[in-house]
Image (spheres, rainbow, N blue to C red):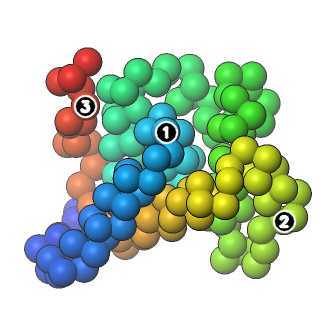
Amino acid sequence: MHQRLDYKLASPEAFKVMLHTEHQVHRSGLEESLLELVKTRASQINGCARCLDMHTKDARARGETEQRLYLLSAWREAPFYSARERAALAWTEAVTQIATTHDVPDAVYAEAREHFDEKALVDLTLAIVAINGWNRMNVAFRTEVGSYVSPHAASR
């Protein structure tokens, strides 16, 4: 597939808004390892190859194991994720699929609240909103896949 357009060049203002949201996510205090899992899981659900390429590379550069990345789509059956990560992944799936389900179940919310205070849950939700936005931009415009190099790779 060929890229339809470069949204960064077509609307630099829109790209800046997306980047501002992303910067806010990273200032939230949520663990970067958790954010990479959330971004990767949402990107799996949305079928965003560009974001999967980026976030798996970033996760690996930050020290994430291949095993946990390989099993992320089956996280419920895999014993390699903490209770906090499981709550975040369940929340990610529920929020990402809201267009289909029209709901985030009370049980998913209750589990998330066991592991995230109000601010952290809002910040986690913003991270999910952001990655879903990036997914939609990249899928819609068929952004090039495979050339991303993690800036974190050099630091390890």
The answer to whether the residue labelled 3 contacts the one labelled 2, judged by CB atoms less than 8 Å apart, is no
Instruction: Give the labeled residue for mark 3.
Output: 152
Q: Which mark is residue 113?
A: none
Depth check, front residue: 121 or 149 = 121
First of labels 1, 3 by sequence position: 1
Q: Which residue is mark 1?
A: 31
Q: Quadrant of residue 76?
A: top right
Residue 113 in the image: above or below residue 156: below
**Going by the image, does 104 lie left or right of 119?**
right
Tell me: residue 54, above or below residue 110.
above
Residue 120 drawn at (x, y percent): 59, 54
Q: Earlier in the sequence, mark 2 or mark 1?
A: 1
Residue 149 percent location from the top left of the image: 20, 37
Instruction: Say which amino acid is labelled 3.
Output: His
Name the quadrant containing residue 150. top left
What's the residue type where badge 1 is placed?
Answer: Glu
Q: Secondary structure at mark 3?
A: loop
Q: Is residue 65 above or below residue 3?
A: above
Look at 62% across and 29% down and name the residue there. 71
135 up-or-down from 61: above or below: below
